[in-house]
Every structure is written in structure tokens, then in C-alpha cells.
Image (cartoon, rainbow, N blue to C red):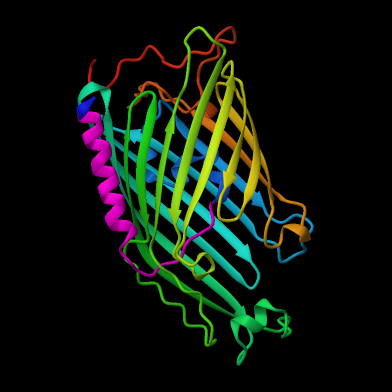
Amino acid sequence: MKKMKKYILILFICSFFTFNFKGNAQALPINSQYVFNQYLINAAYGGTYLFTPIVINHRNQWVGFGESAPQTSSISMHSSIGERSGMGLYIISDETFPISRSQTQLSYSYHSVLKNKLVLSMALSGTWNIHQFSYQEGITYSEMENGITDLVNSENETESVADMNFGLMLFNDNFDIGISIRNLMAKEPIDVNIEDQIKRVRYILLHGSYMVSNPNSAIGIIPSFVMRKMGIATYNSVYEFDFNCKLVYRNNIWTGFSYRTHEKTFATLLGFNTQKLFIGWSYEIGSSGLASYHHGSHNIAIGLKIIGKNARAVRNQTPLYMNLDSEWKKIRFFNTRQHKSGK
């Protein structure tokens, strides 16, 4: 127990220093997509499951707002390689006229088995970022944002840049806590000949979850949180929290809620599992900003679980929204496979 507290303390110390270190890089909106796909926020999840998940996410934001409403889509997969490693890939695209952004990430993770069945996963990712601005010469971003100018005949400017992400995660079969530092290179200029540029800085995510369960019960509860220090000017470098809770029934159906403090957004969650497929859906509604001008946001995720003949899991517990247990009579949180440590 003392060892576990020591490792957790190390993670918090790392987060303290990184939260007070400034840089400049662009953040891509992930929002509640990570509830269905944790790999999106931390590549340290890569290769820690018994199977290879291929997940497609789509977020339709601000329904009823019009053609300029943001749209975010992603596809990802990750898998274990060898005894202690994992690799993963994701592609994410976000469009909010006149800005479109995309990022491709390729990650490698290493899993170090500690005492008391604790595992420390460390991940390093390379990313390729593409940013496109539709603009008209001589106008400012503020004029675009406020609809002062006509963009029908505007030109396009595209910039691309490479960057890196880093992730750490400490976990066992019941909990995980991690930190993800995005855009390590912190140098990603956009030159589109406009006065007002979007300020971009490195940003950090701290996350954790805990599984409350009873082996004889058909119900499990998983509370979790994500804390962000966003660097985009829109967020004014404030700390933002997400609080989530999932209620899982017989490994086949789960529901829950999520609340985001800064945007004052509340989301309802719903998911369904089979042995080879899972589907997740969420609906978000806000109470500030543009909330009165639209009808909320929808997120949908579809995941395929590929199980290899020689598949091996770093953790006994796979994420409940992708659980492999087909036994409907009771929920089973631990499978019979032996941990990599041999214990």
C-alpha cells in the first residue's frame, strides 16, 4: 500500500511541474469521446487490453446551429506487441468553419510490472498535425468569427507540423491514474496573413477512475474524472474538470452521466456490449454560452474487438464498456488469465 501511494505521489509531482510549464501548441477537441475511447486522451492505454479495439467516434455538436456547427470524428486502434509493449494509431478530424484541423498519432507504450500487481505504462507518440484556414486577404479572424465579411470566395491556407505526446499511467485491476502531456515540441506557428491568430500552448490532462464492485452482484459502478489545463485562448488557461460515473449491468448494458465544469455541460451516457462489438452514445446539453441557440450535441462510438490467438493482457480487467464476458447471469470483473507478472 505504501508503494502504491509512492507511485501515485510521483504522478502528482509530475503533474504539478507540467501544469506550470508553458509552451505553444494546438489542442484538438475530444470532449466526451474519451468516455468511449480512453486511448484518445492517453496513449499509455495502448496495448493494455486482452483484445485489439478498433473504435470509430463521431461528435455532432450544437445540433440546429447550422452548417458552421463543429463536427469531430476519429478512428483508432491499439494492440499489445510482445510481452511488455503496445502500439496504437488514431486519426482525428475537427471542422469548425473557417477552421479545420486534423491529427494523426502513432504511439508506442512500455508496460512495467511493479509489486502488488501494479503496472506502470509509459507512452511516447509522434503526431502529424494539419491546419487549414479559409480566409480572405486583408480581413481579421474576428471579422470572420462575427460574420462581418463574405467568405464564399475566400482562399485556403494549409499548414502542417509534427509534434509529440507523452503519457504515464499507473493501474491495477481496480483503478487507474494517469497524466498525458500533449504537444511536447510546443512550436506550431500558423501564418495565414490575418491579425488575430489563435493562441496555442501545450496542454495537460490528468485522469483517474476506480471500479466499485461486488463479485456476487450484477451491477458495477465506475466513477472517474479528467482534469485539463487548456492553453488555447478560448479557455484562458483555466483548469477544467470532467466528472463521470458509469453504472454497468450484467456486462452487457451500461449507462451513466458526465459533467464538465468550465462549459457547464451535462451529458447522459448509454452503451451496449457483445463479445465482438460495442456501441456507445451520449447526449450533451450546456447551460452557458451558446446553449440557448442549439439543441445539444450527440456523440456516437462503434467499436470492434479483435481477439488474437495468443492475446495477452497487461491487466486482468478490461474496460467495462468493452467487456469480453458473455455470461449474463452475473457480472464478472476478473478473467481467469494470469497476469504477466505470473502472480
Q: Residue at x 35, y 72 (%)?
A: 187
Q: Which residue lies furthest to the bottom in this view?
A: 138
Stretch of the chain drawn in magenta:
3-30
**Picture quarter with the C terminus:** top left
Q: In this view, does 94 lie above or below 285?
A: below
Considering the whole magenta stretch, tell me its main secondary structure. helix
Q: Nearer the viewer, residue 213 or 288?
A: 288
Total labels drawn: 0
Q: Residue at x 43, y 47 (%)?
A: 89
Q: Residue at x 51, y 23 (%)?
A: 323
Q: Which of 307 and 229 is in front in this view?
A: 229
Please tell me in which quadrant of the rendered image residue 200 appears. Answer: bottom left
Q: In this view, does 188 lie above or below 179?
A: below
**Direction from residue 53 to residue 181 in the image, left or right:** left
Find residue 23 and report its horizontal and vertical position in percent: 34, 68
Magenta stretch containing residue 10, yes or no? yes
Q: Nearer the viewer, residue 67 or 159?
A: 67
Q: Which of 159 and 189 is in front in this view?
A: 189
Q: Is residue 171 above or below residue 341?
A: below
**Direction from residue 152 to residue 208 in the image, left or right:** left
**Direction from residue 257 to residue 153 in the image, left or right:** right
Is residue 46 in sight in this rendering? no
Find residue 269 and report its horizontal and vertical position in percent: 64, 36
Please tell me in which quadrant of the rendered image residue 96 appears. Answer: bottom right
Q: Is residue 138 above or below residue 171?
A: below
**Picture quarter with the N terminus:** top left
Magenta stretch containing residue 254, yes or no? no
Find residue 157 and report its horizontal and vertical position in percent: 55, 79
Find residue 153 and report its horizontal and vertical position in percent: 71, 84
Is residue 267 in sight in this rendering? yes
